[in-house]
């Protein structure tokens, strides 16, 4: 998401190692693991880039304007204070008719993941949009499930010997079926069907990974419905049964979309260019509290896999928005992961672009 979103940042909370953010059921092994993930960064618009008639990994990796990913990039990410990275992947860019992933693509994803793992970073890999074929679960469940399981079976086998710093995420935001139901309309029976599809796919994901060699204990990230907070806290969304209780839930945050996404007025909303009223801040806190109450209070870790906004907004508002979302989530035990397409972290100099960021980080790190 936010392919063209350029997030201007003067923020934020990338180096803290806070403790004591959870209590009660949140003192589970899985919650302890998620607290170690700190604050994360997305390698956006890179290995998930698609939409060209390419024939090589490099063509796809660079087709949305970012340079080839290097080990030095992750050295810099580590130095900047991030503790986790999310690596979105479009596997269908280079895949055979029988769903066999191209060996060069598989090797490249593993190499990039290893750059991060070698820096002692936590790493998330997923199926990320990938042409949108996951939407076909609502019209061809069995055929789509076959492709889904074929892809994950290969990923699980390839990565089975990596440490538990490597996390598998079931999918990105595509786990929603608007042809059946969405939160703006649809019959209750269709809503139940839409949620049931995602719940079943997530369960298939857990069962497949758990049965695949050395992945019996691997931490898994379960995509919420559309990774939307309002939908994911809905009782219709069910976490899949995991025999080892090492599953986390994934949500994203781009609310209000009139500020974060909409750059000019559209038929569905009027673009907002500023943000930061008391009501704006209260809404973020209310949304994050819903996640805490639904999951964290029950001992289920939450990863805010993406948050960000368009750079074509008031810079002070952008700063306040990102800081508020990150700090609010982090204070509640949620793992916040910044969406970046190359506008926050310079992948050529391997440094954060905003010179003020270092001073902000130093001040935050000094906070008791």
Image (tube, rainbow, N blue to C red):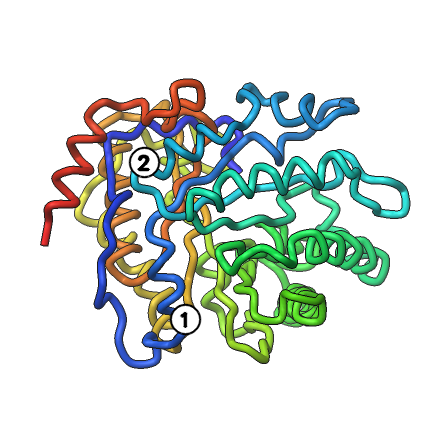
Q: Is residue 290 above or below residue 38?
A: below
Identify residue for label 2. 79
Q: Is residue 152 above or below residue 243?
A: above
Residue 158: x %, y % from top left? 70, 52
**Discs 1/2, front:** 2
For the question of whether residue 167 can be seen, the reply is: yes
The residue shown at (41%, 71%) is 295
Identify the secondary structure beneath mark 2.
helix
Cα separation, mark 1 vs mark 2, equals: 31 Å
138 and 12: which is toward the camera:
12
Q: Quadrant of residue 189?
A: bottom right
For the question of whether residue 194 can be seen, the reply is: no
Residue 165: x %, y % from top left? 48, 56
322 and 83: which is toward the camera:
83
Q: Are marks 1 and 2 in contact (CB under 8 Å)?
A: no
Q: State left or right for residue 326 relative to residue 5.
A: left
Q: Is residue 91 above or below residue 32?
A: above
Q: Quadrant of the C terminus?
A: bottom left
165 and 347: which is toward the camera:
165
Residue 194: x %, y % from top left? 66, 64
Q: Residues within 10 Å of mark 1 (few under 14, many from 20)?
A: many
Residue 245: x %, y % from top left? 51, 76
Identify the secondary structure beneath mark 1.
loop
Q: State left or right for residue 139 relative to residue 68.
A: right
Q: Which mark is residue 208?
A: none
Q: State left or right for residue 95 relative to residue 86.
A: right
Q: As drawn, which residue projects farthest toward the right?
A: 97
Q: Earlier in the sequence, mark 1 or mark 2?
A: 2
Q: Quadrant of residue 185?
A: bottom right
Identify residue for label 1. 295
The residue shown at (63%, 42%) is 110
């Amino acid at each position: 998401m936010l392919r063209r979103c350029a997030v201007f940042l003067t923020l934020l909370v990338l180096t803290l190692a806070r403790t004591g953010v959870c209590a009660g059921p949140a003192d589970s092994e899985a919650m302890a693991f998620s607290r170690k993930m700190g604050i994360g960064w997305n390698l956006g618009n890179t290995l998930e880039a698609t939409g060209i008639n390419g024939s090589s990994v490099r063509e796809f990796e660079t087709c949305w304007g970012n340079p080839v990913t290097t080990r030095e990039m992750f050295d810099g990410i580590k130095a900047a204070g991030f503790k986790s990275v999310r690596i979105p992947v479009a596997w269908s860019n280079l895949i055979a008719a029988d769903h066999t992933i191209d060996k060069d693509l598989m090797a490249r994803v593993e190499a990039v993941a290893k750059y991060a793992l070698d820096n002692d970073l936590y790493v998330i890999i997923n199926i990320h949009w990938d042409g949108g074929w996951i939407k076909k679960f609502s019209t061809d469940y069995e055929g789509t499930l076959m492709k889904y399981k074929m892809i994950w079976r290969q990923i699980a086998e390839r990565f089975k010997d990596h440490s538990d710093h490597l996390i598998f995420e079931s999918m990105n935001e595509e786990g929603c079926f608007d042809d059946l139901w969405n939160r703006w309309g649809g019959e209750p029976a269709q809503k139940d069907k839409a949620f049931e599809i995602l719940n079943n796919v997530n369960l298939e994901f857990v069962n497949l990974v758990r049965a695949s060699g050395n992945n019996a204990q691997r931490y898994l990230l379960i995509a919420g419905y559309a990774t939307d907070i309002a939908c994911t806290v809905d009782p219709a969304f069910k976490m899949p049964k995991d025999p080892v209780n090492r599953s986390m839930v994934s949500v994203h945050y781009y609310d209000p979309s009139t500020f974060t996404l909409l750059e000019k007025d559209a038929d569905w909303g009027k673009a907002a260019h500023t943000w930061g009223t008391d009501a704006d801040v209260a809404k973020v806190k209310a949304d994050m509290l819903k996640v805490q109450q639904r999951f964290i209070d029950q001992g289920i870790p939450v990863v805010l896999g993406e948050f960000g906004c368009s750079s074509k907004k008031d810079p002070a508002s952008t700063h306040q928005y990102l800081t508020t979302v990150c700090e609010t989530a982090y204070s509640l035990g949620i793992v916040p992961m910044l969406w970046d397409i190359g506008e926050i972290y310079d992948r050529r100099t391997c440094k954060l672009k905003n010179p003020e960021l270092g001073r902000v980080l130093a001040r935050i790190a000094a906070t008791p």
